[in-house]
Image (cartoon, helix red, strand yellow):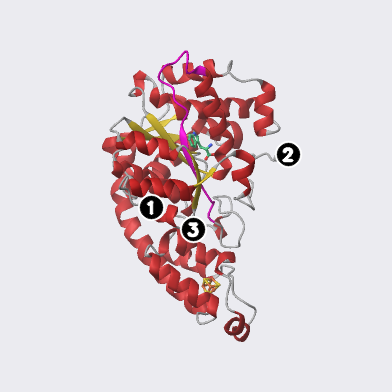
Amino acid sequence: MAGEDVKIDPWGRPEIKDYARLYEVFGIRPISEALAKMRELGVEPSAFMRRGIIFGHRDLDRALEAWKAGEPVAVVTGFMPSGRFHFGHMLTGLQLVFYQRLGFKVFVCLADAEAYAVRHIPRKDAVRIGVEEYVANLLALGLDPSTAEFYFQTSRGLPYHELIQLFSSKVTYNEMEAIYGELTPGKIVSALTQVADILHPMLPEYGGHRYVVVPVGADQDPHIRLARDVASRMASEVEYFTPPAATYHKLIRGLDGGKMSSSRPEFTIFLTDPVGDAIRKLRASVTGGRNTAEEQRRLGGEPDKCPVFDQYAYYLVPDDSELESIERRCKSGALLCGECKAFGSERLKSFLETHQRSLEAYKDKAWSIVEAPKY
Ligand code: TRP
Ligand code: SF4
C-alpha cells in the first residue's frame, strides 16, 4: 500500500515537506470540505483555516454537527513544558480560544510526564515552565479559565491513570511500531498517556460523554490515529468513548527557514521576548527576496519561501485583504524586503507590547488555576 514506508515521528519533530501527501497516505481530509460545512452551520472559519495554515482534519464536520445539535463538546490539546512559549505554540492557543468562544469546554494538558520521559526535563523546571509560560500566556491570549481546565499529566488523578493501564492491553507492540517507528518504554507510556489526555474528558469523572476535537500540528497525527483506534476498540466496554476529531496545522517556520523551537532561540520569537530582541531577530531573518534590489524589482520576491511572510500570515496581519496586498506587492517586486521588515517590526512591536501588558496580570493568577504536582 502507498505510504507503508511513511512514518511520522512526533518526538523527532520531523519537518513535513509535503502536507498534501498526508491526505493520501493517512486519510487526513482537506480542511476545505469542513469549511463549507462550517459556513452552512453558521460559523465563520478562523483565519488559520481560511488561509490553509490549518490544512486538514478528521471528523471536524461531525464534531460541529454535534455542537450545532446542542450535544456536549470539548476541545483538548497539550503542550510539553520543555521551553519558553513561542509563536508556534500561540497557534494552538488561539484555536482553543476560537472553540471556547463557540461554547466548547477546554482541556489543556501540560505534558510534564512526556517532557520528563522524552526530553529529560527536570520536574521542577517542567512545573514552573508549565505554569508561568504556558498557562499564563494562554490566559493572556484570551483563554477564559472559567470554562477551561488545565492539568499536569502526573497529577491528573486516578480515573485518568487507570485509562493508561487499560489502554496498554488494547494495542500490540507491532501496531505501535508500525505507527511510530523505533520505540522506548518512555515513548510507549507517553503515547498511551496522550491517548488518555484525549479520551479522558469523556469519562463521567471529567464531565461525561462528549465530542472531542484535538487541534494539533501535523507531527502529532500518530497519536490521533492511536487514540481513534483505542476509542473504537474500547467502545463496547466504555460506552462514553467516541473516536476524537482532529485538525492539523502546518508548523510555522523559524526565522532561518528551519524549525521554530525553544532550543533555537535566535530563530524563534517568544511571547516574552523584549521588543528590541524580537525585532532584531525579525530583521536578521532570511526572506524570500532576491540577491539584489534590482533583481527583486525585476523578478519579484517569493513569499511562500519567506519566514517573515509566515509571521504575517499566522499572526501579524489578521486582515485578509491586507495580507493579499502584501503578497501581491512582494511577488510583483514593488515591495522590497527592507521596507517589508520595517512594517513587520512595527506590527511585532505593537503585538508584543499589548500581549506583555496583559501577561503581567496573569503571571500570579496562573499558579492558582492549576494544581502543581507535589514532586
Ligand atoms: N505530545 C504533545 C507535544 O509534543 C503534547 C501533548 C500531550 C498533547 N498530550 C496531548 C497534544 C494531547 C494534543 C493532545 O507537543
Ligand atoms: Fe518576504 Fe517581505 Fe521580502 Fe516578500 S518583501 S520576500 S514577504 S520579506
Comes first in the chain, label 3 or label 1: 1
Distance between the Cα atoms at labels 2 and 3?
Answer: 34 Å
Rendered location of residue 256, percent (x, y): 60, 62
Q: Name the residue nearer the viewer: 137 or 297.
A: 297
Q: Is residue 239 magenta?
A: yes
For label 1, the residue is 46
- Res 207 visible: yes
- Hey, what amino acid is under mark 2? Asp
Q: Which residues are magenta?
A: 234-252
- Res 105 visible: no
Q: Residue at x 63, y 48 (%)?
A: 21
Distance between the Cα atoms at labels 1 and 2?
Answer: 34 Å
216 relative to 206 in the view: left or right = right
For label 3, the residue is 269
- Hey, what amino acid is under mark 3? Ile
Q: Respond yes or no on whether mark 2 lies under 8 Å from ligand 1.
A: no
For label 2, the residue is 5
| Outermost residue to the top | 237
Vertical placement of residue 320 versus 117, above or below: below
44 relative to 326 in the view: left or right = left
Q: Is residue 345 magenta?
A: no
- Image quarter of residue 128: top left
- Hey, what amino acid is under mark 1? Ser
Rendered location of residue 187, percent (x, y): 62, 29
Q: Residue at x 59, y 84 (%)?
A: 293
Q: Secondary structure at mark 2?
A: loop
